[in-house]
Image: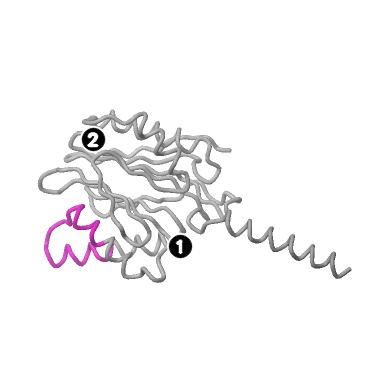
Amino acid sequence: ASGASLETRARRGDRSRRNSIAMSIMSYNGAAIIAMVGKNCVAIASDLRFGINQQQTTAVDMRKIHKIHDHLYVGLSGLATDQTTLSQKFKFRHNLYELRENRKMKPETFAHVVSNILYEKRFGPYYAEPVVAGLDPETGEPFITGMDLIGAMAPTTNFVVCGNNEESLFGVCESMYKENLEPEELFEVIAQCLLAGVNRDCLSGWGGVVHVISKDKLITRTLKGRMD
């Protein structure tokens, strides 16, 4: 009897270890975010699913992209509660900057502010990975960067992705992306990349939203995706 109980306990221990390895807190709620650079424009897109514990789909209208000002947006993947906390902190810091400097914050400056906020908590980090996308308010130069949960930036001149299905998003972006896309072309490419990238991922999807930012215009459109 004692041998059987030891065997049962060992089996339970193996199962709990497997479960702990399989579940990451970064994919607890599910997310997929892409940012892309075009010709004097940038685009940022995210899915709309809000799940719990990698199983239950609770809502299909979750906002993961947050407006900082007309030419600057930040997308957040990871734990939903930390996304909310960080978006409020980012807006607060930008509002203070605007009051003190009497001007809008440049995307690169904002990215360093975000990195600094995350690195302050490096020993007990926020479980969220930001993607910053925007245009310089004066020159109109595009800027995008991704970063990890302790604020290590990875600025680029083409595209950046984050979420729990990064591999599939990278694959479709590498296939479809071209340089110097006009705003409408950029919208089409990033929309197709998002829909194709989340197509086989059960933790993200259920539609999406795309923002295309240019010097004198903002395009925001909602995408209809698979609902299963």
**Nearer the viewer's eye, disc 1 or disc 2?**
2
Is most of the magenta stretch helix, strand or loop? helix
Q: At 57% from the left edge and 49% from the top edge, which residue is drawn? A: 57
Q: Position of residue 98 (x, y in %)?
A: 17, 62
Q: Residues within 10 Å of mark 1 (few under 14, many from 20)?
A: few
Quadrant where the N terminus is found in the figure: bottom right
Residue extent of the magenta highlight: 91-113
**Which tag, 1 or 2, sits closer to the chain's start?**
2
Amino acid type shown at disc 1: Thr
Q: Is residue 165 left or right of residue 116?
A: right
Q: Which residue is mark 1?
A: 81
Which residue is under mark 2?
38
Q: Which residue shows up at 50% across the image and 50% down it? A: 30
Foreground residue, 20 or 222?
20
| Secondary structure found at label 1 | helix
Mark 2: secondary structure: loop
**Which residue of the protein is positioned furthest toward the front in this rendering?**
3
What amino acid is labelled 2 in the image? Gly
Q: Nearer the viewer, residue 206 or 53?
A: 53
Horizontal relation, residue 79 to residue 68: left or right? right
User: On the rendered structure, is 127 left or right of 18?
Assistant: left
Is 16 above or below relative to 199?
below
Q: Based on the picture, tell me whether residue 137 belongs to the magenta stretch.
A: no
Expressed as whole percent of the image width and height from the top left, the position of residue 48 reads 46, 45
Q: Residue 11 is drawn in which quadrant?
A: bottom right
